[in-house]
Image (cartoon, helix red, strand yellow):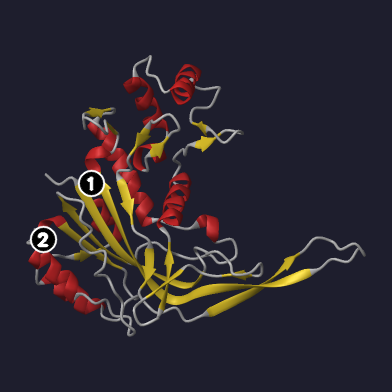
């Protein structure tokens, strides 16, 4: 039985700074980047930023996200709702003791807050949950060109009453493609797993679990970095997707997705991996946005020879939970 959803995709950016690094000076905002063995630089969006964007997208889809109180402590259930449950949770955080039915508490918390279920948590008194969702950074497939944007940042008013300003340089990624991979351990969605005994306690019904998985798929379709696009609105939703249901958490396609300088998807390594691992074509779903990649027809033909039909985004991703 398949326990994992392996979803790898490519997206395209036009003009973006979706994840800034630490500046070398007050007026420089560098883009996060890594270097290869030849000294070429490639921009990337960190896994932490991606998970933040996933939460942003879930909120846009109407899901409630957990927060912290004024003291910075975890705050889950509003005081005017489920007051008794909140008090129990506060006691658990304070004393680390279980003097009540934990399953009742966690069922309430998981049902209300999707992020605690799918992203996990760690509390000061030892309560923690491993994330059923693992994400890779988004890494550019093309070399960083070194483009920049400039803006004016105001300073505090000087003693003479005059305002001062400073020119700020922001590094940009332009006209490039990013690759990304997400692994979802579907068996752990809405299931409490004891980290010592591995005892599993299902908290909600199977149909409710399926509804949550569909919401996660909707999030992937619409993924956006809303918190970083105030003046550089950009689209990081998938433009090419390959989805596989599998029994292990190995991200087989993580380092295979690539777009060459002619905007062609390099498809041969993907096909070879499907063949080498003897992956059942019935468990593979592929989607391609028309008009983005130069070798669109070649990609479709390559998968068709294996009995894999390239479909639309809803069909490919929704097939995982149908």
Residue 307 visible somewhere in the drawing: no
Residue 149 horizontal/vertical position (percent): 60, 75
Can residue 25 be seen in this snapshot? yes
Pointer 1 with pointer 2, Cβ within 8 A:
no
Q: Front-most of 110 and 234? A: 110
Work out whether residue 298 or residue 243 is closer to the camera in this orientation and state it.
243
- CA distance for labels 1 and 2: 17 Å
Above-or-below relation of 124 to 255: above
- Residue drawn at x 54%, y 55% is 227
Q: 30 and 109: which one is in front?
A: 30
Side of 161 where 15 appears, left or right: left
Residue 111 x, y percent position in the rendering: 37, 31
- The disc placed on residue 281 is 2
Secondary structure, mark 1, is loop
Question: Given the current orientation, which residue lies at the most extreme right position?
Answer: 160
Q: Decide if residue 300 is on the left or right side of residue 293.
A: left
Indicate which disc residue 321 carries. Answer: 1
Residue 98: percent from left, percent from top:
37, 18
Instruction: Determine which quarter of the picture holds residue 37.
Output: bottom left
Residue 85 sits in which quadrant?
top left
Q: Position of residue 131 (x, y in %)?
A: 33, 43
Q: Residue furthest bottom?
A: 262
Looking at the image, residue 253 sits to the left or right of residue 156; the answer is: left
Q: Quadrant of the N terminus?
A: top left
């Amino acid at each position: 039985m398949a326990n994992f959803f392996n979803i790898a995709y490519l997206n395209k950016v036009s003009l973006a700074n979706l994840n800034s690094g630490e500046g070398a000076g007050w007026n420089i905002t560098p883009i996060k980047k890594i270097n290869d063995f030849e000294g070429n630089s490639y921009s990337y969006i960190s896994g932490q930023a991606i998970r933040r964007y996933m939460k942003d997208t879930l909120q846009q889809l109407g899901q409630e996200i957990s927060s912290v109180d004024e003291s910075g402590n975890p705050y889950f259930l509003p005081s005017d709702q489920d007051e008794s449950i909140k008090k129990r949770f506060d006691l658990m955080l304070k004393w680390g003791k279980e003097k009540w039915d934990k399953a009742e508490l966690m069922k309430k918390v998981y049902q209300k807050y999707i992020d605690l279920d799918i992203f996990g948590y760690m509390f000061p008194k030892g309560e923690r949950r491993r994330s059923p969702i693992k994400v890779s950074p988004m890494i550019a497939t093309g070399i960083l060109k070194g483009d920049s944007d400039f803006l004016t940042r105001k300073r505090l008013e000087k003693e003479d009453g005059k305002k001062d300003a400073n020119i700020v340089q922001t590094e940009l990624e332009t006209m490039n493609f990013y690759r990304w991979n997400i692994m979802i351990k579907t068996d752990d969605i809405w299931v409490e797993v004891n980290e010592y005994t591995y005892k599993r306690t299902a908290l909600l019904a199977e149909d409710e679990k399926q509804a949550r998985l569909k919401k996660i798929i909707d999030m992937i379709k619409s993924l956006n970095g809303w918190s970083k696009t105030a003046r550089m609105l950009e689209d990081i939703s998938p433009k090419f997707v390959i989805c596989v249901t599998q029994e292990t958490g190995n991200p087989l396609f993580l380092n295979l997705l690539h777009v060459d300088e002619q905007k062609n998807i390099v498809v041969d390594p993907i096909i070879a991996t499907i063949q080498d691992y003897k992956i059942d074509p019935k468990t593979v779903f592929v989607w391609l946005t028309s008009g983005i990649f130069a070798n669109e027809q070649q990609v479709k033909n390559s998968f068709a020879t294996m009995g894999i039909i390239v479909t639309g985004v809803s069909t490919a991703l929704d097939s995982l939970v149908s």
